[in-house]
Structures are given as C-alpha cells and as structure tokens.
Image (tube, grey):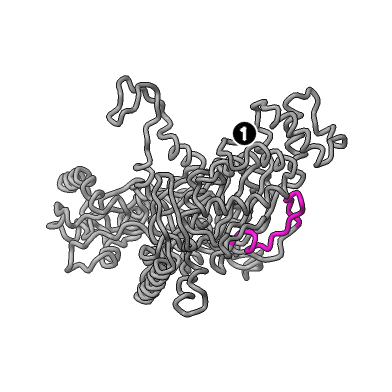
Amino acid sequence: MDRFFTVQTLSQTPNPQQIIYAAMHQDYAENFVWDEREHFPNEADAGAVVVKHLLAGNRGHYGPLEHPQIVLNCGFFPHSTMQQIRTHRVGVSFDVQCLAGDTEVTLLHASGRLRKIKISKLYDLWANGEAAIRERKIRGRHGEPPGLYRRDCKTRLRNMKLRVLNEETGIFEIGHIQEVFAQGIQPVYRLTLEDGKTLDCTENHRLFTSKGWQTMKDATGLMVDANREVIGYTQTCYLMANGVIVGEGLYRNKEWLQQRLQAGLTARQIAAEAGCSIEAVKKWVYAYGLRLNKAKLGTLNPWNRGLKGAYRLNLTPEKRRERRERSRQITRRGPDSNFWKGGVTEERVAIGAWTRTIAPQIHEKFDYTCQRCGIRGGTLHAHHLLPVYACPEKAFDPANLVTLCKTCHEFIHQQNQELSFAQTVVPIQALPQKPKPRGNKLKAHPVKVVQIKYLGLQRTYDLEVAGEWHNFVANGVVVHNSFRYTGSRIIDVVEGKRDIEEVFYLRPVGSYSDRQGKRYDYTETLRQQDLDWCLKACYRYAERIQQGFSEEHARGIIPFDVRQHWVMSANVRSLMHLLDLRWKLDAQLEAQQLCELIWKSFKEWVPAIAEWYEANRAKKARLAP
C-alpha cells in the first residue's frame, strides 16, 4: 500500500441499516411505517433482517439500499485512478459541490439577451439528446438500428454562450460548457440573499464570495445537527452576484435603482448621480415596475399662505378671448418663428418616406442599438445626425443617419438637442462615425446571505466549464464548476517545500503484468528516471507560470499521474457496485488499494451488510445488487 493513500469519512447517514429496514418494510406494509418507528429493531437486528430478507433472499428489489449516503474524502491517489473510478461510477459523485436540479444556469442568446435553463434540463439534453422523439426508419450511418430516438445535441450545447466571470477584472465574459454531470442524491441547502435571490446547493459547493472562493460551509460558518437541520451560521457572507453595468448606463441596473429609490432620491437626483437625463431614469423605473419618490415642492409654510389680496389671474371669458386674439396677432408663426424647422412640405414628406425605407439597413449597421441610451432592441427610429433644416444636402445621405429608440428620439426633438447630440456622438467634421461598440460590460457585485435552510436530499448536478475561467452563473450567483485545478503543490516541489513523491505517484519497484499477458520489470533505475522527468516537468511548469501562463494552460506539461484529492459520495448499493468493479484481483493496482481503504469505512458503517458482502461477493467480480 502506498504510504500516502488516504480515505477518510466526512459524513454518513446515521442508523443506515435501520433506514434500509424501514424502506424495505414500507414496500410490503399497509400501515404508515413512521407510526411504527418506536418498534423498529435496533441497528444490528435491522441489519440481520436486511441480509436475510433482501440480500440473501435475492428478491431483486434493491431500491431500499439507495437511501443511506456516505461521503468519503480520498487523497493522494493518482489522477488516473480518480478518472477510472469516475468513469465506472453508478450513483457515485465527485467533489460533492453540486446544485439542485431547479437551479437556472445563465446563458446568452446571439442577440445578447439572457437565456436561463434549469441545470436538470441541461443534463437531460446532454445525456439523452433533444427532447423531441424522432423515428429512424433505416439504419443510421454509424450503424444505429431503426426505431425511436432522441438526437444527440452535445455539440450545440458546447457552442452555447455561457456567462462566466473573469476573476481578475470582475467583468463577466463568455465561456462554454465542457461537460454536464449528474452528481447523485445529496443533502441540499437553500441560501437566501438580501436581494431575494436563492441558491440551492450542497455545503461543499464552492462559491465566489467577497473574500474569494470558499465552500458554502466555510463561507457561512454553517452549523447543523445530526439530521443536517441548520442550527445557525457564524459568519457574515457576501456572495458575488450577477452584474451591474460598468460606467455609463448605471441607471439601467434594477438593483442600483432600487437602492437609490430606497435612499429617498428623486428622479432628478438619480439622473445627476448617473450622468443621464431625467427621462432615462423614469423610463427604467417604470420598466422595472418601481415607484419614483416625489420631489418636495416648496416649503411647509410658504410666505403667502393664507394671505389675502395675493396675486391671482382671475379673467372673465371675454378677457380670455381678447388675450388669445392678441396672441395670434403678435406671435410669430411658421417660417417667421424662431423655432421653424422647415414645415411639412412635399420634400419633407419624401425625406420621411426615404428614411423609413432605409431604416432597416441603418439599424443593422448599428446592431439595433440606440446610440444615445445604449439599449438594444425595442421601437427604433432612424435619426438624421445633422438636422435636415440645418443641412438639407445631408437629407438623403445614409451616413447621416443613426439609430435611436423612440424615447430618445422624441426627447432630442422636443428639447431641441439635435446639435448637442450630434456633437456628443461624433464631431460634425468627422461624419460618419464607427458604430457604438455592442453591449455593456457587467461587473459582479456582493450581496449578503440572510438565511440558510436545509431542504433535504435531492438529485444534484454540476457543470465543467471549458476555457480559462472555471465558473458560471447559477440563479444569479457566481459558483464554481467541477474539477478545479490548482498547481500550488507543483511550485512547492520546485521551492523544496514538498517531496516530489508527495505530489506525483509512481508505482513501486517490482514485476508487473496486465490482462493482455504483457509482463515487465519496473526497476529502481527506471523509476529514478521517471522521478527525474517529473522534477523537470515541475521546473518547466514554474517557468510557464512566471511567464504569465494560466494554471490550466501550464498543467498540460505535467505528468498525468499527479496525485489527486477528491470527495466522493455513494449509497450502499452503488458502493457495493464500485467494489465489485474495482476490488477484483485483475483490477488496476491503485484501484484495488483504494477499495481496500473504502472497505474499512463501509464495514464500520453497515457491519451486517458488509459481513454478508465479504462472504458472498468480495473480490469475486460479480456485480452487486
């Protein structure tokens, strides 16, 4: 046995044989077995009943074995062993950092709009293909038989845009799904955030907090009782949540608007703080269904309150008609008005018709994005950057048109902002201008956890994310993906802080053979050469890190059998299945040694079942129930 190999029990269902007995008894009982719990046999006697009537009886109904769960921490095994166990698992989960099936993963449409899909649905599509059932009437090109099937869609899922966080800048970017996992049945807790968001996850799932990556349990200081019910939590935790808009456009963020309104600010004050118009603030307040704070008009005790003889415009109907007639005579109208913009002539009608005809091309050029407020989509207008009344020669020039939303277009004309807007978009002498960059940058922001609740055992799932950043957004919160890699132990070897055999696994010296009959001797000389090669790889890895390479990129030069730690959960049935597969005498040496260590925990946990298994199935390569 390798001196570093370790398996420790993190947690386990108490009284597992009694639970199996209760489930087995309920299957054949008319009464509600909860009412009989005071009369259940003790743990040892319950185990004897399970062995006699379920296992030794070979009744074939083994569902009750799947209720108790055990969580094991496996350490210092070669990476290849972890991958082999992972490949052959049935109900065995790794990392146990999992999310409940209803958790929504944030993806993006090509248009930039958000798309949220439940992680359980993602797994169903990943494992089983498209939901629509299709019929193949002839044999497929890869030899698939005729019949009903669901078409594989993994390529399409991998091409979907997944929202991930650049952990260095705090800005959200685009990533892609590498793998979707079903992580088995796990104890799940619900975290409720101050803004109303909720996240259902296991206590070991890693979350991006204001202090960096932490497991849910460590981040909150979670305390639970023997039944996993929450007693309390000792630490104030802020999770990094979905983004607020960086720079311009802050007023379009719902959370920011809510905070400003709750602070008592008016639309004018919010507009001044965000650097936008009052109309833009009102537009987004109403769009989110929020309520504006009314501005305080005057003072509580104005100077003329109750004063007799104050100024009043109390005109008779005859006087009002006289004022209107005088206004018509004095006020300059039409071309004589200071506000004259050309009127609606036949030429202006033609310009309007041409503008509406070419508008779709203009909107496509500007990616359907308003060039004033930056909002994409909605009701769009084509606006003359240089007004027609000022530059009639530019009336039919497509380069003089930009895309505006209806609200911004009306505001510019109503407030006589044509010239100032044209100058802010582009210098008048430099038309046309390159379209405004698409979209806005979003930055993660911290939100406080205000409640934690135990939800019970649920089916759980997780993602593996391709690329540099191994995270994704779940229910609006930044969470970690499976199988995160870190290279700090490699650097420790270079700096002399760790022995190289603590980081890399090499088989002991000896004679070996495989299932194909190949025989070979692994000598001390060959083993030392391999150790030297591992050391050189460590130095090359450290060199790449110093050159600025990411850990994920630099790890490609590391030997495959770097030692790996992982957390593994299983129920009684799946654990016996794993022992059947990897404890047999022709299994990989390292896998056999892993099973030897797992067996110690299994035997202490369910002694009666373990005794039956050891006598009837251990190392005999027969599949367990």
Q: Is residue 550 visible?
A: yes
- Depth order, front residue of 363/598: 598
Report crowding for label 1: few under 14, some 14 to 19, many 20 or more residues within 10 A (C-alpha): some
Residue 31: x and y in percent read: 81, 25
What residue lies at 27% left-to-right and 58% top-to-bottom? 332
Name the residue tied to disc 1: 625
Residue 291: x and y in percent read: 56, 53
The N terminus: image quadrant: bottom right
What residue lies at 30% left-to-right and 21% top-to-bottom? 138
Tell me where the magenta segment starts and ends, as one range.
215-231
What residue lies at 40% left-to-right and 30% top-to-bottom? 150
Where 322 falls versus 622 (above or below)?
A: below
Task: Tell me where residue 45 sits by quadrant.
Answer: top right
Residue 504 belongs to the span the image colors magenta = no
What residue lies at 38% left-to-right and 75% top-to-bottom? 539
- Depth order, front residue of 91/49: 49
Q: Of helix, strand and loop, which one carries label 1? A: loop
Q: Is residue 313 visible?
A: no
Q: Is residue 93 left or right of residue 556?
A: right
Q: Is residue 602 left or right of residue 314?
A: right
Residue 622: x and y in percent read: 57, 36
